[in-house]
Image: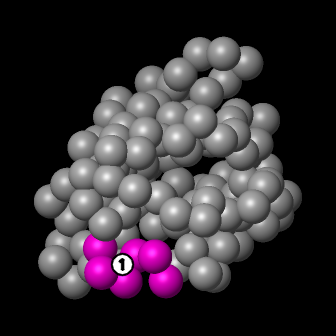
């Protein structure tokens, strides 16, 4: 598998873990607006070398989640802002333009220094 994106979480917003209870993980690169930072998992933005597409694999701390749907602006948001709402519901159509859906159980916890990768066969 080829890694098309990789980053490491450096900060967890105060309310970011609440989204996990809703089967979501919201990411944003360092320097996020203060009002959003509290709700996001902040990372040291990597380079997206190809657009994320259905069939790619999200990996967080070694656990893999197949990508099932990609919103219309998710790739632009990831490339420019490191901002994506990851939904762990296996939906085949994106609920919102900035959402990427994956299948699998939402991570029980995401910690500082956890690595997020997006891989392609």
Q: Is residue 99 above or below residue 56?
A: below
For residue 115: magenta?
no
Give the image location of residue 43, x and y in percent.
Answer: 30, 50
Q: Is residue 114 visible?
A: yes
Q: Quadrant of the C terminus?
A: top right
Q: Quadrant of residue 13?
A: bottom left
Which sits in the foreground, 95 or 111? 111
Q: Residue at x 52, y 79 (%)?
A: 19
Q: Is residue 85 visible?
A: no
Q: Residue beneath label 1, please?
A: 39
Q: Is residue 114 left or right of residue 68?
A: left
Q: Is residue 45 above or below residue 26?
A: above
Q: Residue at x 60, y 65 (%)?
A: 108
Q: Which residues are magenta?
A: 13-18
For residue 15: magenta?
yes
Give the image location of residue 74, x and y in percent.
Answer: 52, 54
- Secondary element at image label 1: loop
Q: Residue at x 59, y 16 (%)?
A: 2
Q: Quadrant of the N terminus?
A: top right
């Amino acid at each position: 598998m080829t890694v098309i994106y990789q980053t490491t979480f450096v900060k967890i917003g105060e309310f970011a873990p609440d989204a996990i209870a809703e089967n979501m993980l919201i990411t944003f690169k360092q320097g996020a607006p203060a009002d959003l930072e509290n709700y996001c998992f902040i990372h040291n933005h990597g380079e997206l070398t190809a657009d994320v597409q259905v069939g790619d694999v999200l990996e967080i701390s070694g656990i893999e989640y197949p990508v099932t749907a990609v919103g219309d602006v998710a790739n632009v948001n990831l490339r420019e802002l490191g901002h994506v709402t990851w939904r762990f519901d296996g939906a085949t159509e994106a609920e919102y333009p900035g959402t990427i859906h994956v299948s699998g159980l939402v991570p029980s916890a995401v910690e500082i220094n956890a690595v997020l990768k997006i891989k392609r066969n």
